[in-house]
Amino acid sequence: MLIVIFSLLLSYVVVRTRNPVVRTVFNWFVVGLAIPVQAAIIPVYILITKLGLYDTLLGMILPMVAFALPLSTLILVNFVRDIPNELYEAMGIEGANDFQIVFRLVAPLARPALISVAVYQFVQSWNNFLFPLVLTQSASVRVLPLAIVQFQGEHTMDVPVTMAAVVFSAIPLFLAYIFGGRYLRQGMLAGFGK
């Protein structure tokens, strides 16, 4: 949810601000797509431990949000850019401030993109393995993929239990696609007919 809100606000700022500094910062921000998580895991680990967030949920959430923002913002910028300027001007004439414009105009019109981002980022967060592996130690804050790995012993593996856990872990992903699939398809296909 944090990713969706932050990327919506960032995309609005990028599209509506005519400042070249904002464009340059956004271009460098999108360069973050080229940095793989594996290349940055050691600096992230050092930063999280220095902040005292090691082995906490917040210590896992912050890096996930940081690495998800570039792609989510890029997707939403393309949707927000397609909203006609006349609608922004009409909201401004009616006295709406920027937050009202974002949540009363942009969010409803960009619903397919927002749901696409939400479903995609949910799948990424649910299946995340590296951050929980490196940034947690106790079982109380670990995620399901790490728990499934713990079913494997040094020389043995309980295959039926592992397969049951894999099926169990896939249920939320199927539900996310079932409930958000229509919007996910709309979000992925938007812009092809233009």
Image: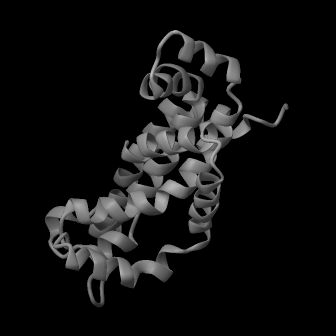
Disc tally is 0
Q: From this viewpoint, which residue is outermost toward the top?
A: 94
Figure quadrant of the C terminus: top right
Q: Is residue 133 above or below residue 70?
A: below
Q: Residue at x 26, y 83 (%)?
A: 153
Q: Position of residue 106 (x, y in %)?
A: 55, 26
Q: Position of residue 19 (x, y in %)?
A: 62, 47
Figure quadrant of the N terminus: top left
Query: Which sits in the foreground, 182 or 174?
Result: 182
Q: Where is residue 33 in the image (x, y as percent from the top left)?
A: 59, 65
Q: Which residue is drawn at 45% across and 23% down?
A: 97
Give the image's coloring scheme.
Answer: one colour
Q: Which residue is drawn at 35% across and 71% down?
A: 131
Q: Is residue 127 visible?
A: no
Q: Using residue 27 as the reference point, say whether residue 119 is left or right of it.
A: left
Q: Is residue 122 visible?
A: yes
Q: Using residue 95 as the reference point, say whether residue 168 is left or right of it.
A: left
Q: Is residue 152 above or below residue 154?
A: above
Q: Using residue 18 as the reference point, say whether residue 148 is left or right of it.
A: left
Q: Quadrant of residue 16?
A: top right
Query: Which sits in the foreground, 36 or 89?
Result: 89
Q: Using residue 55 as the reference point, say whether residue 109 is left or right of it.
A: right
Q: Which residue is drawn at 15% across and 72% down?
A: 138
Q: From this viewpoint, which residue is outermost toward the right?
A: 194
Q: Where is residue 29 in the image (x, y as percent from the top left)?
A: 56, 62
Q: In this view, does 41 lie above or below 56?
A: below
